[in-house]
Amino acid sequence: MIHANRFRFRHRRFTFLPACLLSLAIAGCATTIPRTDTVPPEIRLEITGPGIGRQVMTNPPTENWTAPDGTQLFDLKPDTIYRFLLTVSDRGGVARATIRIPSGFVASNLTGGTIERADDLLRSLTLTGSRADPRTGLILSGRFTTPDTGASNAISFEFLTEGDDFGGASGATNQRFMNVSATVNAL
């Protein structure tokens, strides 16, 4: 009986430890803004859902995403829910993480950001960092629902992502962009 209780306690501790590490990674570590910073932040976008599985795109290495098989876009299904996770990281602190999606997409379950309309065609989801409490990473996550395109129509668009750092204590902001081409297609 005593051994069983010890095992349960240890088992809980070991399952709790990865959860703690994951939450620390998601929150981003506090950092100090360096005197000078000339290296742009890194961007990572993950989109998961029916028909595409899990797609992970990063810059570096490239500003325009290309799949391992060489294709430069992926097809999303109409009227379907997809999850996204945008991570922007920089050792000197991240000032801003932004993803722009077509305004016809319905964004929901957002974590970490606010929705701002960029124009009639795009909706910007933005998370802003703080110089007073700089973090090595900012994360935006949520879901979007693609519009219904009808029986034979297709919509071509791009996910536009941007990451900015603080540029050091006295420098100009460093920016990095990544564009991901996609379609919503009924076929």
Image (cartoon, rainbow, N blue to C red):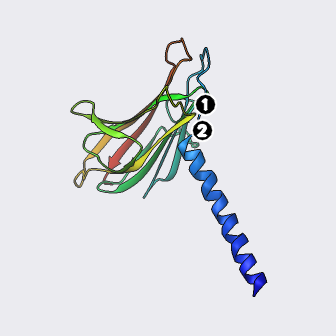
Instruction: Pick whichever, 34 or 2, lies toward us.
Output: 2
Report the quarter where the N terminus lies. bottom right
What residue sits 21% from the left and 33% below the top?
Answer: 120
Image location (x, y in percent) of residue 156: 33, 39
Q: Is residue 134 above or below residue 38?
A: below
Q: Report the residue at 56% width, 17% height from top.
A: 168
- For image coordinates 55% across by 46% down, the residue present is 26
Look at the picture and state if 90 lies above or below 5: above
**Residue identified by numbered label 2:** 29
Amino acid type indicated by mark 1: Thr
Whole-number angstrom distance, CA of label 1 to CA of label 2: 6 Å
Assess disc 1: are there few (<14), some (14-19) or many (≥20) residues with their C-alpha within 10 Å of its C-alpha.
some
Residue 12 in percent (x, y) is at 66, 69
Whether the residues at callouts 1 and 2 have beta carbons within 8 Å, the answer is yes
Is 121 on the left-hand or right-hand side of 181?
A: left
Residue 88 percent location from the top left of the image: 52, 35
**Residue picked out by circle 1:** 31
Query: Is residue 57 positioned above or below 151 on the image?
Result: above
Query: Element at badge 2?
Result: loop
Residue 68 is left or right of residue 147, and the answer is right
- Badge 2: few (under 14), some or many (20 or more) residues near its Cα, within 10 Å? some
> Does residue 156 show up?
yes
| Front residue (pair 160, 151) | 160
x, y percentage for residue 115? 30, 39
